[in-house]
């Protein structure tokens, strides 16, 4: 891999640079590029996402996967193991860079277990919620104690004595969690409930409705000890991907105004906190070939602003679950229908706003070497307006509309004078 020390000029080209892109993303000749983590990527002025290499953690059909961070290098995943009587199962995942090493799976529920969701309470304790088919499909929770790669489950506790679907749980403190779900006992409404934890014992609070419509694929994440965010498929609004802030006081929950983050049928949503004002949601995008997709959500008070979605798996992807590792890195697990329905994991990194470093000279695939023009005259464009300043928008495309990202000035219909034209650009108008 090339590093900054490998960059050198030959004429007006930057050479010997290794290209690294997200899953399915390659560079095309004349793409505007940026330097990020000593790699070259297509320019994005807005927050973006790149994905690492997928890693199988269960070589059998896995369903209802859910993952939670324990530390920045360790996570826990829960799922229904179709290779073992559909029992509720948990497994520790050790993480090094973008590599994932699974531990030995452990059963926490010896019955058919649906809609599993797991959350960290401490670095050695987690809580899992699920629909217990062995007990009238009631909503159930269980504490999991972790030592190294070993997991010891506690005694399950019922939090909803009705058929409960799409359960999702998030930590609020080391002794308090919040669970969201579709309550079949109350018109399939989206519902939330606070869970108080003492040792391995769980005491549920009073349920609160946050969406008075059929609510599928609920997922909840903590933002602070008194604020959470829930994502779901809103059947009352064309099955769009929707998010809502939940304010918590004691065992009381007050929902904010829902916000759409995907205007298409959105399945298998999962959300995780990155910071107290930023979250990441993953989902199956039925509006884009059912690909595994991720999107950053910015939060201000009870308002939510979604970023630009990014594909992390270019195949039909179900049961996605995402967890924070750091404020700029998350891990997503899912069932990869493009690879024998195996349980699969992938690291996602957010790209913070960057500076333009040049223009790609050729079309390349990920991890290929590429020459980049960083100064002087760059040709190969079409239909430029001579004498106009050209800027780069948030998606990396050229525009004559002013942005914070000035690229150069068109000196012909096919050529732009880069960087070296700064003096001219400062002294003439478009």
Image (tube, grey):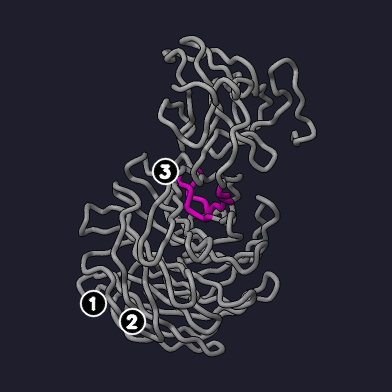
Q: Nearer the viewer, residue 98 or 45?
A: 45
Mark 2 and mark 1 in contact (Cβ < 8 Å)?
Answer: yes
Mark 2 and mark 3 in contact (Cβ < 8 Å)?
Answer: no
The residue carrying mark 2 is 160
Label 1 Cα crowd, 10 Å radius (few <14 / some 14-19 / many 20+):
few
In the image, is residue 10 above or below residue 223? above
- Taking the view exactly as shown, the residue that stands out farthest to the right is 5
C-alpha span from label 3 to label 2? 33 Å
Residue 291 image label:
3
C-alpha span from label 1 to label 2? 9 Å
Mark 1 and mark 3 in contact (Cβ < 8 Å)?
Answer: no
**Residue 28 seen anywhere in this rendered image of the structure:** no
Number of numbered labels in the structure image: 3
What percent of the width, then of the height, locates residue 158? 39, 84
What percent of the width, then of the height, locates residue 342? 52, 51
For the C terminus, give its image quadrant. Answer: top left
Q: Residue at x 27, y 75 (%)?
A: 209
Task: State the SS at label 3.
Answer: strand
> Toward which corner of the image does residue 420 lie, by quadrant?
top right
Tell whether 382 sits left or right of 14.
left
Q: Which residues are magenta?
A: 332-350
What percent of the width, then of the height, locates residue 304? 37, 59
């Amino acid at each position: 891999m090339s590093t900054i020390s490998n960059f050198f000029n030959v004429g007006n080209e930057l050479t010997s640079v290794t290209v690294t892109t997200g899953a399915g993303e390659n560079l095309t000749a004349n793409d505007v590029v940026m330097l990020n983590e000593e790699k070259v990527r297509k320019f994005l002025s807005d927050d973006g996402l790149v994905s690492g290499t997928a890693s199988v953690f269960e070589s059998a059909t896995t369903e209802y996967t859910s993952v939670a961070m324990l530390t920045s290098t360790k996570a826990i995943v829960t799922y229904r193991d179709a290779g073992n009587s559909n029992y509720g199962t948990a497994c520790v995942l050790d993480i090094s860079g973008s590599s994932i090493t699974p531990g030995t799976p452990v059963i926490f529920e010896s019955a058919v277990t649906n809609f599993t969701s797991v959350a960290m309470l401490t670095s050695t304790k987690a809580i899992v919620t699920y629909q217990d088919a062995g007990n009238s499909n009631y909503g159930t929770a269980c504490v999991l104690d972790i030592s190294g790669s070993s997991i010891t489950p506690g005694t399950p506790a019922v939090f909803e004595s009705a058929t409960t679907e799409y359960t999702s749980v998030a930590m609020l403190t080391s002794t308090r969690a919040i669970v969201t779900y579709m309550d079949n006992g109350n018109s399939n409404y989206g519902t939330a409930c606070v869970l108080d934890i003492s040792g391995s014992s769980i005491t549920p609070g009073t349920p609160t409705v946050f969406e008075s419509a059929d609510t599928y694929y609920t997922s909840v994440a903590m933002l602070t000890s008194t604020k959470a965010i829930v994502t779901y498929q809103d059947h009352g609004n064309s099955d769009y991907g929707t998010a809502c802030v939940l304010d918590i006081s004691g065992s009381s929950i007050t929902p904010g105004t829902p916000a759409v983050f995907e205007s298409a049928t959105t399945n298998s949503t999962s959300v995780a906190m990155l910071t107290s004002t930023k979250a990441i949601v993953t989902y199956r995008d039925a509006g884009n070939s059912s690909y595994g997709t991720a999107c950053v959500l910015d939060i201000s008070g009870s308002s939510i602003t979604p970023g630009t979605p990014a594909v992390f798996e270019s195949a039909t992807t179900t049961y996605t679950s995402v967890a924070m590792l750091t404020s700029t890195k998350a891990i997503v697990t899912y069932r990869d229908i493009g690879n024998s329905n195996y349980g699969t994991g992938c690291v996602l990194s957010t790209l913070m706003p960057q500076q333009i470093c040049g223009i790609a000279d050729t079309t390349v695939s990920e991890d290929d070497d590429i020459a980049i023009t960083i100064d002087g005259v760059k040709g190969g464009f079409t239909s430029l307006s001579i004498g106009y300043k050209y800027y780069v928008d948030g998606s990396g495309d050229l525009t004559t509309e002013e942005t914070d990202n000035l690229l150069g000035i068109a000196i012909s219909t096919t050529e732009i004078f880069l960087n070296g034209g700064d003096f001219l650009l400062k002294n003439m108008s478009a």
